[in-house]
Image (tube, grey):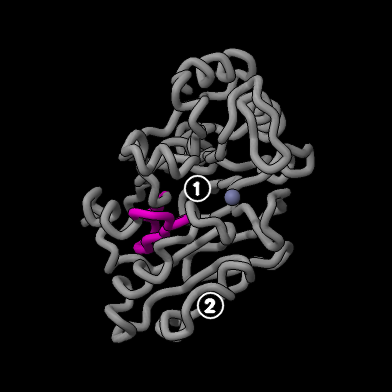
Amino acid sequence: MLRHMESQLLFLGTSGDLSLTAERLRKSGGIIIKSGGQQIHIDPGPGALQESAFQGANPKDTTIIVATHNHIAHSADIPAMIAASTQQGTRQQLSIITSQSVLEHIPRPYILWCQNMFPAVLGKKITVKNIEIHPQQVYHNDDGAVGFKIFTPHSIIGYTGDTKYAKDVAEQYKGTDILIINVKYSRNEKSATNLTMEDAEKMIKIARPTLAILTHFGEKVHSENPLYEAREIQKNTNVQTIVATDGLSIAPESYSAKLKTKTLNLYS
Ligand SMILES: [Zn+2]
C-alpha cells in the first residue's frame, strides 16, 4: 500500500490493437494513476480487472474511472471495475468520468452503484476531492470522445486518448509534466482517426512536456519495435521520450516542473 503522499503511474497494458491482445503480444486494460490517496483507472479495456489486481493495484481501491471513448479497447471492463470497486454497490466511493457515448452503454445498475457520474464535456472541469480533470479535444471516430488533462497534487498528466493529429490538439497539452500519447501507427502509415509516430513527434515538439510516454501500439509499430522511434523522437525534439511497456511503473512527481521549482527555491 502506498503512503498517502506517494504517487505512481502504472501501465497495465500497451496494446492499441485487440489482435495484439488476443495473441498475448501486448496486454490491454488501461493505465492507473495513484496520487493523493486516490486510484484513477484510465481506459479500462479488456483485462482491466485481472491486470490491475495482478499488477498491484487492487480494483477495490479504485476511486475514479476515466474513459475517453466508447471503443472496446478503452471501455470494455467498466462494468467489471465498477462492480469490484463498489463491491456490488455496497460501497459508495466511485466517481466515473467519461463521454456521453460511454455512459449510454453502461448497464443501469452499475451506473447507480457509482457515487458520482460526470459526463466529460469540453471546457468543463471536473473536481473529485484533490484531483481535477479537464476534458480535451480529440478528432476520432466516436462522437463525444475526449482526451484528458489530470491535475494531481504533484503533477499534471496529459493523456491524448485516441485522436488524429491537429495543431489545436497538440497545443492543449502545453504545460503538462507527463504526456501519454496513443500512437497506433508507424511513421509511414496514414490514419484519419489515430496518431502516427510522425504525428507524435509533431505533438511533442509543440506540447514540450517534461516526459513523453508512447503507448497504445498497433501491429506494425509493435513489429518494428517502438523503442527505435522513441529514440529518434527524443533526438529530434529534445524532450525525454520513452516507450511504455506492459507493467511499466514510474513515479510521476520526478517529472513535475512544480516540484522542481520548489526544490530550486530551497537553495536560492
Ligand atoms: Zn478508438
Membership of 46 in magenta stretch: yes
Instruction: Work out whether residue 186 or residue 204 is closer to the camera in this orientation and state it.
Output: 186
What amino acid type is highlighted by mark number 2? Met
Counting every numbered tag in the picture gives: 2
Q: Please tell me whether residue 230 is drawn above or below residue 218 in the rendered image.
A: above
Residue at label 2?
A: 117
SS class, disc 1: loop
Image disc number at residue 251: none
The part of the image, by quadrant, that contains residue 189 is top right
CA–CA distance in space, label 2 to label 1: 24 Å
Q: Residues within 10 Å of mark 2 (few under 14, many from 20)?
A: some
What amino acid type is highlighted by mark number 1? Ser
x, y (%) of residue 2?
A: 25, 54
Residue at label 1?
A: 155
x, y (%) of residue 163?
A: 66, 45
Instruction: Work out whether residue 72 or residue 167 is closer to the camera in this orientation and state it.
Output: 72
- Tell me the magenta residue range: 31-47
x, y (%) of residue 165?
A: 72, 37
Membership of 86 in magenta stretch: no
Instruction: Work out whether residue 235 or residue 51 is closer to the camera in this orientation and state it.
Output: 51
Judged left or right of residue 87, residue 101 is right
SS class, disc 2: strand
Residue 91 in sight: yes
Residue 170 in sight: no
Quadrant showing the N terminus: bottom left
The reply to whether the residue tagged 1 has its Cβ within 8 angstroms of ligand 1 is: no
Mark closer to the chain start, 2 or 1: 2
Q: Residue at x 36, y 37 (%)?
A: 26
Q: Residue at x 60, y 54 (%)?
A: 148
The part of the image, by quadrant, that contains residue 181 is top right
Q: Residue at x 78, y 43 (%)?
A: 168
